[in-house]
């Protein structure tokens, strides 16, 4: 494994504005903590409102020339970015494990996933199409074209620090938009390294700007009030998303919102138990359960609930907990102490409400923000764990008897990002796909995220889509030209 100290010493830790690394106005910096130890990894420049405006200035200056850059050139830069990220896959993986906590194996998986957005959207950049035809009344011709929205503010979360950056930056660049990226204060280092890599492959100054900050509202608020900003893309909590939508309304910004989730994981009596349990392990414990797509509510048919819980708990109890960057680790730490306190509170509430701990259920002694992977059985619908996003390694199991009951339980949420369904009955699966109130349906699979597929939810899980052919449309305006005299 690479030397941790050597990697950390080599990292950029300033603001990246207009192609230059610089300190924050006033020189402020903040600590980045290793959640496995609670110790400081390094410090990062803490952007001020003045720095945020400097980043928007740079993005605005670069917008016209970047929009005029031939799509093929934009595509080639994205492709070079893909190759450069993959060339430094070990650095990115170790860095994400250090600042976020995930196990190295999962971190390497995120590098592959995150880099693929660069390659996918490099291929989309040259596929933008409009239309031309005669109006039905024959008087005019209808010409439809696409053009970039303009400077975009991209606010990314801490749980997938590389993939959430590439999932937003890549389509914006492919469409011809410049960006200001505000990474999460908990995990800014991965985004800063990504910006460095993209600058090294030749992305022009001002196209990508990165402004880590501990005062997000003070920094991003003035940007959204500035008419030069034309797009906001945010991944994070629904509560913060609501506030950003309100702020974005002032200038009627184009918005993409990927918000919270409360994913149901429905297992019917005819499901293959092994397939369902393997899917559950991926859907629940991937990324230590800290994913908006994580299975939150396990809704299992009463006839197989005991067998499912036993098989799931056996696999869960075999998971090795420890610092993610150490060999053989399956479950790393939660991102901070607040996250661990939240998870422990949900488990304690469920137990006090009658739930049974099958395995796990406590924080191990020692340094870091660890929590044992946990399986709860006989969880009541009234328990907080069934209505709040867990964002931790806890599987809460409840039961059902009929298909209609399963649908009602699954849809009993303000959220609708993803639903998981396991059955060997194809007709039932198609009925569930039509009835489940989610933007994504995972059929007999625990992981379906893919750069070539549209990612997003319904209800309070968000607006718009990321990835797929739909992802680039979020950064394009549709323009209609009516042509007469032909």
Image (spheres, rainbow, N blue to C red):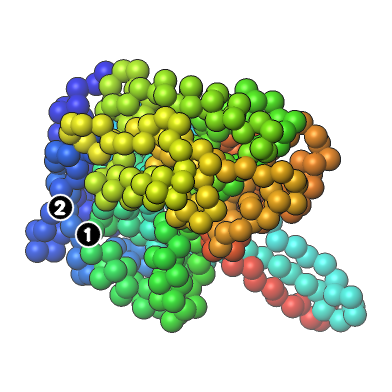
Q: Is residue 70 left or right of residue 12?
A: right
Residue 280: horizontal and vertical position, in percent?
A: 55, 33
On the question of residue 94 being in view, the answer is no
Q: Residue at x 68, y 55 (%)?
A: 408
Q: Is residue 474 above or below residue 43?
A: below
Q: Which of these two is toward me, 12 or 399?
A: 399
**Which quadrant is the C terminus positioned in?**
bottom right
Q: Which of these two is toward me, 352 or 435?
A: 352
On the question of residue 327 being in view, the answer is yes
Residue contact at pointers 1 and 2, CB within 8 angstroms: yes
Q: Which of these two is toward me, 330 or 150?
A: 330
Q: Which of these two is toward me, 13 or 206?
A: 13
Q: Residue at x 59, y 30 (%)?
A: 306
Q: What is the secondary structure assignment of the residue under circle 1? A: loop
**Mark 2 Cα shell of 10 Å, populated few (<14), some (14-19), many (≥20):** some
Q: Residue at x 59, y 67 (%)?
A: 477
Q: Residue at x 51, y 56 (%)?
A: 382
**Quarter holding residue 303:** top right
Q: Is residue 257 left or right of residue 160?
A: right
Residue 339: horizontal and vertical position, in percent?
A: 31, 48
Query: Earlier along the polypeptide chain: callout 1 or callout 2?
Result: 2
Q: Is residue 284 above or below residue 388?
A: above
Name the residue tied to disc 1: 214
Residue 456: horizontal and vertical position, in percent?
A: 57, 53
Q: Is residue 122 left or right of residue 425?
A: left
Name the residue tied to disc 2: 30
């Amino acid at each position: 494994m690479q030397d941790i100290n050597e990697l950390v010493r080599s990292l950029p830790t300033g603001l990246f504005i207009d192609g230059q690394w610089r300190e924050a106005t006033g020189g402020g910096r903040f600590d980045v903590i290793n959640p496995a130890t609670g110790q400081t990894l390094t410090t990062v420049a803490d952007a001020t409102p003045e720095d945020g405006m400097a980043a928007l200035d740079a993005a605005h200056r670069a917008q016209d020339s970047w929009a005029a850059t031939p799509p093929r050139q934009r595509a080639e830069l994205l492709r070079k970015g893909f190759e450069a990220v993959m060339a430094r896959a070990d650095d990115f993986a170790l860095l994400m494990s250090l600042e976020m906590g995930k196990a190295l194996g999962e971190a390497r998986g995120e590098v592959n996933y995150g880099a693929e957005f660069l390659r996918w959207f490099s291929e989309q950049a040259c596929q933008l199409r409009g239309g031309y035809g005669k109006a039905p009344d024959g008087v005019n011709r209808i010409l439809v074209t696409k053009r970039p929205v303009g400077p975009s503010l991209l606010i990314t979360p801490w749980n997938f620090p590389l993939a959430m950056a590439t999932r937003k930056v890549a389509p914006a660049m492919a469409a011809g938009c410049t960006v200001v990226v505000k990474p999460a204060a908990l995990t800014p280092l991965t985004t800063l390294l990504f910006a460095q890599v993209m600058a090294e492959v030749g992305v022009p100054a001002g196209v990508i700007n990165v402004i880590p900050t501990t005062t997000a509202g003070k920094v991003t608020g003035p940007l959204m009030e500035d008419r030069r900003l034309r797009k906001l893309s945010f991944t994070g909590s629904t509560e913060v998303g609501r506030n950003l939508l309100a702020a974005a309304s002032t200038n009627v910004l184009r918005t993409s919102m990927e918000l919270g989730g409360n994913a149901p994981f429905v297992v019917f009596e005819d499901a293959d138990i092994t397939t369902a349990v393997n899917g559950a392990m991926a859907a629940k414990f991937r990324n230590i359960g800290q994913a908006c797509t994580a299975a939150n509510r396990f809704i299992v048919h009463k006839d197989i609930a005991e067998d499912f819980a036993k098989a799931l708990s056996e696999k869960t109890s075999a998971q090795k907990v420890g610092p993610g960057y150490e060999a053989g680790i399956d479950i790393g730490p939660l991102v901070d102490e607040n996250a661990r306190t939240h998870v422990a509170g949900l488990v304690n509430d469920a137990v006090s409400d009658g739930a049974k701990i099958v395995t796990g259920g406590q924080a191990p002694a020692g340094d870091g923000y660890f929590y044992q992977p946990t399986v709860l059985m006989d969880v009541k619908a009234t328990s907080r764990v069934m209505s709040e996003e867990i964002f931790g390694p806890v599987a809460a199991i409840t039961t059902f008897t009929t298909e209609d009951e399963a649908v009602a339980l699954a849809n009993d949420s303000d959220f609708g990002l993803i639903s998981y369904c396991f059955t060997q009955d194809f007709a039932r699966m198609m009925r569930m796909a039509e009835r489940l109130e989610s933007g994504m349906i995972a059929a007999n699979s625990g992981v379906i995220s893919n750069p070539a597929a549209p990612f997003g939810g319904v209800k309070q899980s968000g607006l718009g889509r990321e990835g797929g052919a739909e992802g680039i449309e979020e950064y394009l305006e549709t323009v209609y030209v009516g042509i007469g005299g032909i």
